Amino acid sequence: MSKCSADETPVCCCMDVGTIMDNTDCTASYSRVFTNRTDAEETLAVLTKRARDVESEPCDIKSTFTEVEGGVQLDIDFVFACEAETLIFQLGLR
């Protein structure tokens, strides 16, 4: 039999999804410095659309623009209704 402590099937060592995804990490964060605010705003629009395409309930999107040396820093937090949506969103950006 298995020596793992997680709930798994002894035959194939498969784990229940709830063992890996427990719905506690529903936030995806993004941060990048752009040379200008226009590029940062365009990226925000693209990422917002991608989040809206994934959401089952409205995703809470909080963004900030900060003037830094060399440009504008864009920080975004996407808070989804469930961890699966967060994962789908993140994988879609790769």
Image: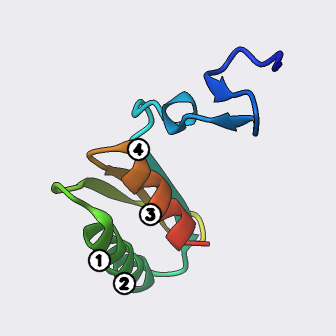
Q: Quadrant of the C terminus?
A: bottom right
Q: CA distance from mark 2 to mark 3?
A: 18 Å
Pinpoint residue 7: horizontal percent, then vertical percent: 61, 22
The CA span between labels 1 and 3 is 11 Å
Q: Classify mark 2: helix, strand or loop.
A: helix
Name of the residue lying farthest toward the left:
58
Residue 92 appears at what percent x and percent y? 51, 72
Q: Amino acid at mark 4?
A: Glu
The disc placed on residue 19 is none
Given contact means CB atoms under 8 Å apart, are the residues at marks 3 and 4 in contact? no
Q: Is residue 62 left or right of residue 5?
A: left
Distance, label 3 to label 4, CA atoms, is 10 Å
* Relative vertical location of residue 1 with respect to residue 21 in this rendering, above or below: above
Q: Give me the residue at 46% from left, 61% from top.
A: 88
Horizontal side of 15 relative to 71 (left or right) equals: right
**Residue closer to the observer: 9 or 74:** 9
Label 4: which secondary element = helix
Q: Secondary structure at mark 3?
A: helix
Q: Residues within 10 Å of mark 4 (few under 14, many from 20)?
A: some
Which residue position is annotated with label 3?
89
Q: Which residue is mark 4?
A: 83
